[in-house]
Amino acid sequence: MFKETHDISGSELMRVISSAYPDARIYIADAAYKHVSYDELLRWLKEDSLDQMRWVDDIWDCDNFAVESYCRAHKVVGNLVYGECWGDTPTGYHAFCIAYCDGKIKIIEPQNDDTNDWKKSDYKPDFIKI
């Protein structure tokens, strides 16, 4: 559970994400969302056991990790700004997650809990679902 959440409207969230990724297909389903601090996100990732699951090529790989991480985050806070993405990355076309924390978009690799600031990364999603 997250100790503290903050509100953001769906329209504001769309503005933030589309300004970062103007070429992506972005799907924002709801009118209101919650976001958490980066420290809270890191704590949750550390406590969650998804990164302990074994990667199996073409069976349990990046898309499965991204969907499972998305579902686990939304189980904790239903309208959390935590999304599933697909796009180009430093390792090729790949599925990963994003979150909005402390006014910044964060990239999450759910199979190992690595996070990055989007401006410092080479992640270019063409599909984002929040």
Image: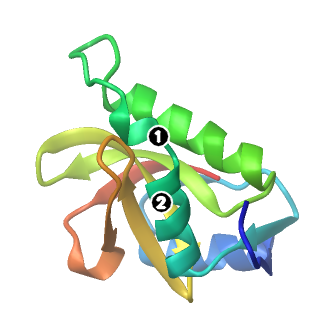
Q: Residue most toward the top? A: 59
Q: Classify mark 1: helix, strand or loop.
A: loop
Q: Which mark is residue 98?
A: 2
Q: Residue most toward the right? A: 31
Q: Residue most toward the bottom? A: 103
What amino acid type should be assigned to the residue bearing mark 1? Ser
Residue 46, image x and y in percent? 44, 57
Residue drawn at point x = 23 percent, y = 49 percent: 88
Let me know if residue 128 appears in the view: no
Left/right placement of residue 1 relative to residue 9 reads left
What amino acid type should be assigned to the residue bearing mark 2? Ile
For label 1, the residue is 49
Left/right placement of residue 79 relative to residue 25 reads right
Left/right placement of residue 3 relative to residue 49 reads right
Residue 81, image x and y in percent? 66, 64
Residue 92, image x and y in percent? 14, 42
C-alpha separation, residue under disc 1 versus residue under disc 2: 18 Å
Residue 10 vs residue 68, the one in the foreground: 68
